[in-house]
Image (tube, rainbow, N blue to C red):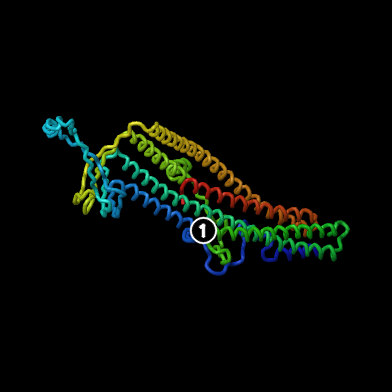
């Protein structure tokens, strides 16, 4: 009779094992409670990686302006003073043959003769020269070199934009995983905390029964071994509670880091359970097809293919000439005293032989182009396999959750029956202890499967480009 009274007292306590479920009560949070969407918004606002990505975009925009600048003329002004060590000199051969012929006739009497040509040296050009020079270079036709350069810069800008979107998706994915990890740690901590309370109550009950209960002839009674078993299980649950508290603290720190908030600030997460977060059905064929279009890595590889296609086109254009306008103005006068000297002209530059440098560049660009195409095919194949793997994992987890939920109900019923039997003296304490352990482990396994299913779904959303 004493045992029955003790067991009834236990099951009438708030939060007894008969009241367990997969989602359980927790201490109320103070202040604003954050949902998953609010945690994501905080992370997108606080994480510095996104601001760094904006700088990459600005850098890419300036690269576009730099590439497009080759369309415009290159105008430069140079002014200065120049001192030459000596004037510019040159010799001129003067033809005096007509004069020499006439003069040499009378001179021949004396044996003299003047040459028909005389060397005359002239010195021209100033030694001190002050001048300003204006140079102009304007490309007229480059066979598409500038266009390809601009195209490559624009592709680089698209890559920078895509990298920002990828970083944004990574931040969201990280917050989701940390949020689910925190919920899991919190629910496990709450579950073990309740289990520790119940294990302590049972240990005290068994102790009272051991010390006061006088069994009847047909009853075995409560032994010291039963009491030690109850104490041992209570200590085991207390140790697990300590570990669960540490894991909850670490999960909270991880969520704060994912959100980009100060680890010293308090964090209040909404009182939601893993079981309350829906697992919406997925159209796997549409999901796989959409992943090939939305996945940020595949987008980057596709942009890489376009980039290296432009690179190989630009490399081939090195075989063709370039046509440009050149002009120069020198004032107020050049070294030789010519006022406001200027010239303008059209030039053509045609590469004839450069040691097969152009051929090597074409080969490099072609190899890089084929490499990126191959990488995209490999990533597409790997992504398809990964989605199939995650699909199988999620399907199995859903089935496991269904089985474990049934197991939780059965464990609860088993616990009730064991308690009733122990109260009536039909079953031994070992059955009650085994039922108590089984219910705790079954609920833990169910929570773990719920957690893994949310993580897998988050992984699928990340790979598929769904945010």
Drawn side of residue 112 relative to residue 436, left or right = left
* Residue 185 visible in the picture: yes
249 or 309: nearer the viewer: 309
x, y percent for residue 327: 23, 46
- Residue in view at x 54 percent, y 69 percent: 31
* Residue 426 visible in the picture: no
Instruction: State which quarter of the image contains the N terminus.
Output: bottom right
Quadrant of the rendered image containing residue 294: top left
x, y percent for residue 453: 57, 49
Residue corresponding to mark 1: 36
- Residue in view at x 15 percent, y 30 percent: 108
The count of marks equals 1
Quadrant of the rendered image containing residue 115: top left
x, y percent for residue 372: 45, 38
- Residue in view at x 31 percent, y 46 percent: 70
- Residue in view at x 67 percent, y 63 percent: 15
330 or 430: nearer the viewer: 330
Residue most toward the bottom? Answer: 31
x, y percent for residue 459: 53, 48
Vertical placement of 377 versus 413: above or below? above
330 or 422: nearer the viewer: 330
Residue most toward the right? Answer: 217
The crowding category of the residue bearing disc 1, from other C-alpha atoms within 10 Å (few below 14, some 14 to 19, many at least 20), is some
Q: Provide the secondary structure element on which disc 1 rests.
A: helix
Drawn side of residue 35 relative to residue 65, left or right = right
């Amino acid at each position: 009779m004493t045992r029955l009274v003790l067991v009834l007292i236990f099951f009438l306590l708030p939060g007894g094992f008969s009241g367990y479920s997969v989602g359980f009560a927790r201490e109320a949070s103070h202040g604003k409670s954050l949902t998953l969407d609010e945690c994501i918004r905080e992370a997108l606002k606080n994480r510095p990686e996104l601001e760094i990505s904006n700088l990459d975009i600005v850098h890419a925009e300036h690269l576009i302006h730099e590439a497009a600048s080759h369309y415009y003329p290159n105008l430069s002004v140079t002014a200065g003073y120049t001192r030459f060590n000596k004037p510019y000199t040159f010799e001129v051969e003067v033809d005096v043959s007509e004069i020499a012929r006439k003069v040499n006739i009378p001179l021949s009497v004396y044996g003299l003769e003047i040459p028909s040509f005389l060397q005359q040296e002239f010195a021209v050009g100033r030694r001190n020269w002050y001048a300003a020079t204006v140079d102009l270079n304007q490309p007229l036709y480059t066979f598409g070199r500038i266009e390809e350069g601009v195209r490559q810069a624009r592709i680089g800008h698209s890559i920078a934009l895509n990298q920002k979107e990828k970083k944004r998706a990574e931040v969201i994915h990280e917050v989701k995983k940390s949020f689910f990890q925190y919920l899991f740690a919190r629910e496990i901590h709450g579950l073990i905390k309740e289990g520790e309370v119940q294990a302590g109550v049972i240990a005290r009950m068994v102790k009272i029964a051991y010390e006061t209960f006088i069994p009847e002839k047909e009853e075995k009674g409560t032994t010291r071994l039963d009491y030690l078993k109850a104490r041992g299980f209570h200590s085991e649950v207390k140790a697990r509670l300590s570990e669960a508290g540490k894991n909850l603290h670490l999960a909270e720190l991880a969520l704060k880091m994912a959100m980009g908030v100060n680890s010293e600030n308090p964090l209040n997460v909404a009182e939601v359970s893993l079981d309350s977060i829906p697992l919406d059905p997925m159209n796997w064929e549409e999901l796989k097809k959409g992943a090939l279009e939305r996945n940020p890595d595949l987008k980057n590889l596709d942009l890489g293919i376009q980039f290296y296609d432009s690179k190989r086109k630009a490399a081939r254009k090195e075989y063709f000439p370039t046509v440009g306008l050149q002009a120069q103005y020198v004032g107020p006068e050049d070294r030789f005293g010519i006022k406001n000297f200027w010239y303008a002209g059209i030039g053509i530059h045609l590469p004839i032989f450069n040691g097969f440098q152009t051929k090597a560049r074409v080969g490099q660009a072609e190899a890089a182009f084929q490499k990126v195409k191959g990488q995209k095919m490999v990533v597409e194949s790997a992504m398809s396999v990964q989605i199939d793997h995650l699909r199988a994992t999620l399907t199995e987890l859903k089935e496991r959750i269904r089985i474990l939920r049934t197991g939780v109900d059965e464990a609860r019923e088993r616990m009730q029956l064991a308690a009733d039997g122990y109260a009536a003296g039909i079953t031994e304490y070992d059955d009650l202890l085994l039922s108590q352990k089984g219910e705790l482990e079954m609920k833990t396994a169910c929570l773990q499967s719920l957690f893994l299913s949310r993580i897998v779904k988050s992984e699928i959303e990340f790979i598929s480009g769904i945010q």
